[in-house]
Amino acid sequence: MRTRIKICGLTREADVATACAAGADAVGFVCYPSSPRHVAPQRLRALARELGPFTVPVLLFVNAAPDLVQAARDLVPTAVLQFQGDELEPECARYGAPYVRAVRMAEGVDLLDCERSFPSAAALLLDTPSEAYGGSGRAFDWSRIPARRSMRVILAGGLNSDNVMRAVQAVRPYAVDVSSGVEEAPGIKSATRIRDFVDAVRRADQRDPQ
């Protein structure tokens, strides 16, 4: 098993190129104006040009109007969509594109109920709840994730090169998602931290091949 890696919140061409060179499987662009990592539509195409041929672009939305989602898709037609707000399953599936549904892992949230609510999702992204939409930069209690699950799980929330090995071994997710854990400032990534994060995930895979 190989844990996939997504580097999210990219705003600069150099950071996209660095993530691809380091071995990231996916890179995320935040299409949410209230985020400090927001990428304006006119920037999406320029950033996407730096993608490697086998690196998947992901467009992140929060309760966005359908025309805004479609406009971003037109600029990056190969993108996977990520819905981080209050979108219901029909709103996520309407575009006919693969999508990831974020789940805020607050107390009382049942992941298996979420699987039943979003059967068309390509994966569920598990993140720490925060006052605003999006990540909090903090980890949640990974023991709340059931070992038996039917959908792919992408683990997010407070990951960095120091704890991602433990996370991979504890959860065995399909993928891990990092943003602030590889940053110098919001939206400004560190090449060293990106490489260290990717290396830590690969070491975790080697130690726990099951």
Image (cartoon, rainbow, N blue to C red):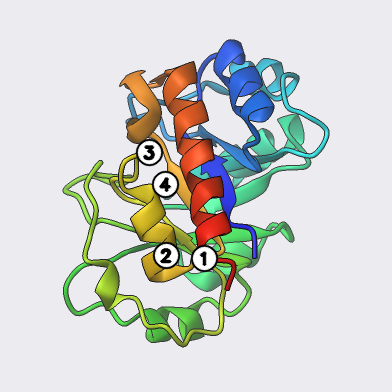
Instruction: Give residue 85's quadrant in the image.
Output: bottom left
Q: Determine the secondary structure under disc 2.
A: helix
Q: Earlier in the sequence, mark 4 or mark 3?
A: 4
Amino acid carrying label 2: it is: Gln
- C-alpha distance separating marks 1 and 3: 17 Å
Q: Position of residue 182 (x, y in %)?
A: 39, 29
23 to 169, vertically: above or below:
above
Q: Position of residue 9 (x, y in %)?
A: 45, 31
- C-alpha distance separating marks 4 and 3: 27 Å
Which residue was labeled with disc 2? 169
Callout in the foreground (1, 4): 1
Which residue was labeled with disc 3? 161
Callout in the foreground (2, 4): 2
97 to 209, vertically: above or below:
above
Amino acid carrying label 1: it is: Asp
Which residue was labeled with disc 4? 62
